[in-house]
C-alpha cells in the first residue's frame, strides 16, 4: 500500500458504524496532538454493498451502532428519526462525492467525509441523494460546491471509486475501517477488539485509544 507522507489512508464505508467511530477518533487524536496542519486523512472507499451484492441491512446497523458508540460517544449518534423509507439504500453516491472532493484537496475530501458521517449518524439525513450531498458540501465551507456538482453529474470520480473497490478486493485491505500509515503500519479498527455474544450481539473486548495517536504520529513522521 503506497501511502504518502503526512497522510493516513482510511479505507471505509460511510454506512459502517465502526468506521464512523474510527474516523472520529482519528480527528480527535490529530487535534489532541496539534497535528491538524501536518496530517491529512486520505479517504478510500470500501463499498460493502458491492462486496455483498446487497444494501447493508438496517437490522445489522441497529445492532452494531450502539456498540460502536461506546468507543466514540462524542462522535454524534442519534437513532434514525426520519421515515424508514428515507434510510439510504446505497452509499455509492456519497462515497463517490468524497473521491470527487479529493480532486480539489485532501482537506476538502476529509471535510466532506466527516460532514456526510455526521448527517447520517447524528442528523438522520439521506446521504444517497444528490441534493443532500451538495447541501452537506456547502456546510463544510471547504468544498467548491459547483465543481463537486459537475463531478457528480459527469461521473468523473466513478472510476476512482471502482479502483478503490478493485484494490479492496485484494489481500491488504481487510474491512471497514482499515488504516494505513506511510511506514507500512496498518490495522483494521485500530485499538478496538470486537467480540460477539449470541445473547447480546457485538461487544467490545478491548479498547486502546492510544492506537489512533500512534497512526497520526507515524503519518507526521513519514
Image (tube, rainbow, N blue to C red):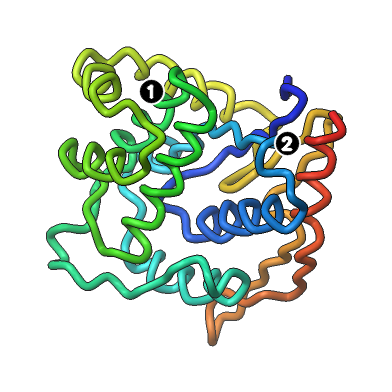
Residues under numbered marks 2 and 1 in contact, where contact means CB atoms less than 8 Å apart: no
153 versus 69 height, above or below: above
Which residue carries the number 2 mark?
Answer: 180
Instruction: Give coordinates of residue 23: x percent, y percent.
Output: 57, 52
Determine the CA span between mark 2 and mark 1: 21 Å
Q: Residues within 10 Å of mark 2 (few under 14, many from 20)?
A: many
Left or right side of 92 for 169: right
Q: Nearer the viewer, residue 152 or 189?
A: 152
Q: Nearer the viewer, residue 78 or 137?
A: 137
The image quarter in which residue 175 lies: top right
Which residue carries the number 1 mark?
Answer: 100
Look at the image and tell me in which quarter the C terminus lies: top right
Identified at 79% across, 53% down, the residue is 213
Dot 2 or dot 1: first in sequence order is 1
Identified at 78% across, 45% down, the residue is 215
Look at the image and tell me in which quarter the N terminus lies: top right
Amino acid at each position: 500500500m503506497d501511502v504518502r507522507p503526512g497522510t493516513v489512508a482510511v479505507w471505509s464505508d460511510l454506512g459502517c458504524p465502526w468506521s464512523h467511530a474510527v474516523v472520529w477518533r482519528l480527528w480527535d487524536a490529530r487535534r489532541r496532538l496539534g497535528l491538524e496542519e501536518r496530517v491529512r486523512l486520505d479517504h478510500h472507499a470500501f463499498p460493502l454493498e458491492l462486496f455483498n451484492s446487497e444494501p447493508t441491512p438496517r437490522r445489522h446497523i441497529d445492532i452494531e451502532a450502539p456498540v460502536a458508540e461506546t468507543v466514540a460517544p462524542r462522535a454524534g449518534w442519534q437513532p434514525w428519526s426520519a421515515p424508514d423509507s428515507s434510510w439510504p439504500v446505497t452509499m455509492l453516491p456519497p462515497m463517490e462525492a468524497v473521491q470527487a472532493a479529493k480532486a480539489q484537496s485532501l482537506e476538502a475530501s476529509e471535510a466532506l467525509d466527516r460532514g456526510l458521517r455526521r448527517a447520517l449518524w447524528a442528523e438522520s439525513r439521506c446521504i444517497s441523494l444528490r441534493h443532500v450531498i451538495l447541501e452537506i458540501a456547502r456546510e463544510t465551507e471547504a468544498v467548491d460546491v459547483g465543481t463537486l456538482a459537475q463531478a457528480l453529474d459527469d461521473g468523473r470520480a466513478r472510476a476512482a471509486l471502482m479502483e478503490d473497490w478493485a484494490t479492496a478486493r485484494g489481500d491488504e485491505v481487510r474491512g471497514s475501517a482499515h488504516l494505513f500509515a506511510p511506514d507500512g503500519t496498518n490495522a483494521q479498527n485500530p485499538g478496538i477488539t470486537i467480540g460477539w455474544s449470541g445473547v447480546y450481539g457485538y461487544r467490545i473486548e478491548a479498547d486502546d485509544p492510544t492506537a489512533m495517536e500512534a497512526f497520526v504520529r507515524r503519518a507526521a513522521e513519514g
